[in-house]
Image (cartoon, coloured by chain):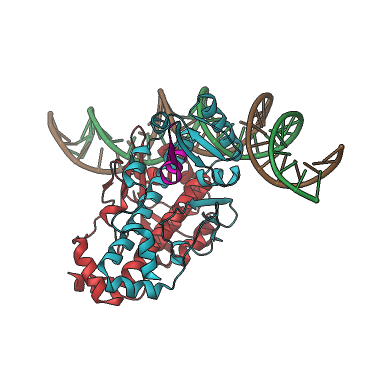
Chain colours: A cyan, B red, C brown, D green
DNA sequence: CGGAACGTTGACTGTCATCAATCTCTGTGG
DNA sequence: CCACAGAGATTGATGACAGTCAACGTTCCG
């Protein structure tokens, strides 16, 4: 979870980093108190940029992979910006749920299951909403039985189509796919290391 | 000006492209009716991505330039997301004015001069605002004599510091600088061509 | 059992979107 | 040169949506 806090303003979670994603120090603006925080257990590989450069220069597949993963990040940020700017709060929440379902969800016979990142506050900050408002909307969705709320932070979406219908960005997110194609992430990172 | 329109939603201008910037087809999400429109006269160079790849692989300076320019684009989009999510309408307008002043402004003895992109609607769509609201805020700023409005689309900012004080993102935008350092854009693009 | 952190829900307020009327500017045709 | 039309900008009145504040519930600790 990458978040920044502009001076005299409140925190904004600007990006959710999922497995296979790539970030670079330069992605975060200066003077904005940018920090990278884990929302769930995960593994991070860190390496000097110069090493990445030489590897990319020597192997076209790696270069292609890197540029692809960066292009996807920009596309996602573009969608996120459109959400923040143009969608009402219900649509934004639906969009986040679609995103989480696509990227971290496991398919079960009853539907798609995924975990919410820790804390309502974090989610609200990602969506540019108030935690209270977010809570209200989640209750509304639950009453409309869009999903059920088994454990603390686990969501089971029974009817994914109904959820996607509430998010104008659903089609775009699905088009972006789950993980970058072409190379397997693991093997790739192992070669980089 | 890159804008997208999510289905069943209104248009969002997601990025302003300035001289020296670089975009790629993959930056725009699919299923979102993405289009690239000029807001002012300018020159665009277009080339196949494979050519860029080979050039970057052969010249570390070009690779460094490309990754730098992309990192800046992401940093800007991050700031823009924070604006849309967390700033009120006055702060967003101030932020845009700071951005335009920094990137397209000319310094005169009386202050900084720059042009507004064509049409209030475009600007409003960039800021996630209503054109009416935007107009009100511009009037408020003019009454506070933050700037004067000589011709139709020309803005003269007398007191840049006062304007920057109204934008929480001003410091971050200034830290990003005007153009990517290192290589001159023109000579670089000419070599690429 | 008690306390703290977090989530939920209700009542109220403020900001911004919407709609409509008016004004300004530009280009066209008489 | 003037009248007119059309597009865009401004501004006011109004309403809806989301933020704020506060009270209450829940869960998880010690």
Q: Nearer the viewer, residue A5 or B90?
A: A5
- Residue with the most extreme front position: A109
Q: Quadrant of residue B16?
A: bottom left
- Relative to A141, residue A116 above or below: below
- Relative to A128, residue A149 above or below: above
At 36% from the left edge and 69% from the top edge, which residue is drawn? Answer: A191
Is residue A85 among what the camera can see? Answer: no
At 38% from the left edge and 54% from the top edge, which residue is drawn? Answer: A73
* Spot occupied by residue A143 in the image (x, y as percentages of width and height): 54, 24
Q: Based on the picture, tell me whether residue A101 belongs to the magenta stretch.
A: yes
- Left or right: where A57 falls relative to B165: left
Main secondary structure of the magenta stretch: helix
Q: Based on the picture, tell me whether residue A162 belongs to the magenta stretch.
A: no
* Spot occupied by residue B84 in the image (x, y as percentages of width and height): 47, 47
Q: Nearer the viewer, residue A64 or A41?
A: A41
At 55% from the left edge and 55% from the top edge, which residue is drawn? Answer: A38
Is residue B60 among what the camera can see? Answer: yes
Q: Nearer the viewer, residue B80 or A109?
A: A109
* Spot occupied by residue B69 in the image (x, y as percentages of width and height): 35, 65
Which quadrant is the C terminus of chain A positioned in? bottom left
* Spot occupied by residue B189 in the image (x, y as percentages of width and height): 23, 70
- Relative to A160, residue B181 above or below: below
- Left or right: where B81 falls relative to A143: left
Give, as a single range, the part of the protein colored magenta. A97-109
- Left or right: where B41 falls relative to A179: left
At 43% from the left edge and 29% from the top edge, which residue is drawn? Answer: A159
Q: Nearer the viewer, residue A129 or A174?
A: A174
Tally of numbered discs: 0
């Amino acid at each position: 979870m990458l978040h920044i806090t502009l001076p005299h303003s409140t925190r904004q979670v600007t990006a959710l980093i999922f497995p296979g994603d790539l970030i670079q120090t330069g992605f975060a603006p200066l003077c904005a108190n940018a920090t990278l925080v884990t929302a769930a257990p995960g593994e991070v590989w860190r390496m000097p940029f110069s090493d990445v450069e030489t590897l990319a220069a020597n192997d076209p597949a790696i270069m292609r992979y890197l540029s692809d993963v960066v292009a996807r990040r920009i596309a996602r940020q573009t969608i996120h910006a459109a959400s923040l700017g143009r969608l009402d709060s219900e649509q934004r929440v639906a969009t986040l749920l679609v995103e989480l379902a696509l990227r971290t969800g496991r398919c079960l016979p009853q539907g798609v299951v995924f975990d919410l990142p820790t804390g309502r506050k974090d989610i609200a900050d990602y969506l540019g909403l108030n935690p209270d408002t977010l809570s209200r909307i989640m209750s509304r969705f639950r009453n409309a039985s869009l999903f059920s709320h088994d454990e603390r932070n686990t969501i089971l979406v029974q009817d994914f189509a109904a959820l996607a219908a509430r998010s104008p960005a659903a089609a775009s997110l699905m088009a972006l796919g789950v993980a970058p194609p072409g190379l397997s992430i693991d093997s790739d990172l192992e070669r980089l290391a």
